[in-house]
Amino acid sequence: MKKCGRIQLNLLKDDIFNRFFPYKILVYADKIREILNENMPCPVVWHVYPSNICNLDCNFCIMRKEKNDNPKHILDKNIFDKIGNDSILNDIKLIHFSGGGEPLTNPYLVDFIYRLKTTKKKTPNLALSTNGLLFTYEKLGILNYLDHLRISVNAATQKTYSLLTNRPEKNFIKLVKNIEDIVSYAKKNKCTCNIGLAYIVTLSNWKEIYDFVKLASSLKIDFVHIRPVFYEKDYENNKLKNLLPQIMELCQMAQYDFQNKHFKVYTITYKFEGYWTNRNFTKCRSTPLQAVLCADNSFIVCQDVFHRFGDYYSNSFLEIWKSDEHKKAIEKIDLNKCPRCVETLHNQIIEEIFIKNTVKIELI
């Protein structure tokens, strides 16, 4: 590690036009105006939870309650076909497979990705968030059709990985090998899929941030994304918050030592802000830009607030999306009870630009 002390790098300015740039929401100004006119535009992104089953048992998982309340649900083959058709009809820009549980525990997912991309025209981009352990050699072919792949790692050593996931240490070795195979296949087949590793910062793993970035750099992936866990208990959240200066210093040193034009280290500070500071907006208005379909065929208003509505098994997407039930689910959002908010800046942009015109949009 280079002895660089507290490097004063502005991690947003260093690479401002990146995948996490919040102002790209302005591209969808027409949809925002529809929302403000109390209409319900079709979403930009469709988050799909293929399964509530997971092969790990991460002690920080925000989906733990969802998996316990709705155990062993998976989307069936017909629902995937319905997703494909509805996403094209409604001009969805991205389908993001995540969880819920581990997406690859659903036996229909890989086949759906193949069929969607080989039999349909003008399909949405595809993203997959996975823990990577089930990404076997037989599944590598989907890299030809994915646009974004994010693999949750959250550790730099076998011991810490085992502690976090409640699984044997040998799983970490398997995960690293799988990532090596993924990168090798993508390079050999000239896949355009953007490959990144995710790191959720906890009280147990924060000291391994630098070594994680070092490992990721050696694996030749495209980027890492480091962000904080959300603890339900205030004392744990406060302990992590108090460690933030040390955490950010490790992030900055790792960025200084390893980031280059081929490998990016993203530690998005505004997401930290959204966890621990007051929200500078009066109402959540951004949720209609993203749909979230759960493994039990119901929709929820966002990935962190489980106000359910609709039954996708029985009704069409538009029937559900434009329903009074959806509107009522949004109206139930209480900012004081939201567990966290990664939509903070999106909601600030909507309120300050589209409602208050604080920036005086006529003065370009």
Image (tube, grey):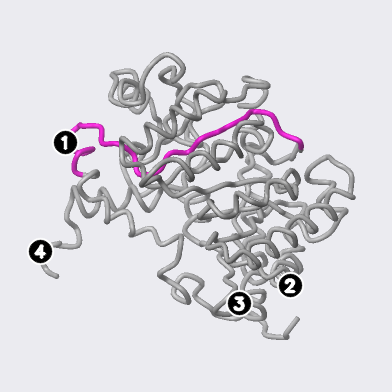
Q: Earlier in the sequence, mark 2 or mark 3?
A: 2
Q: Which of the labelled discs sits on residue 259, or is there none? A: 3
Which segment did they paint magenta?
A: 33-55
Quadrant position of the C terminus in the picture = bottom left
Q: Which mark is residue 88?
A: none
Above or below, 203 relative to 111: below
Q: Position of residue 298 (x, y in %)?
A: 48, 22
The residue singled out by tag 1 in the image is 37
Q: CA distance from mark 2 to mark 3?
A: 11 Å
Lateral position of residue 155 relative to residue 342, left or right: right
Q: Secondary structure at mark 4?
A: loop
Task: Tell me if label 1 and label 2 are in contact, CB under 8 Å.
Answer: no
- Residue at the spot 48% in from the left edge and 40% down from the top edge: 116
Q: Quick one: label 4 or label 3, which is nearer the N terminus?
A: 3
Q: Amino acid at mark 3?
A: Gln
Of tags 1 and 2, which is closer to the observer?
A: 2
Residue wearing tag 4: 362
Element type at marker 3? loop
Q: Which residue is pictured at 26% across the width and 50% down the height?
A: 28
Q: Report the side of 317 relative to 354 (left or right).
A: right
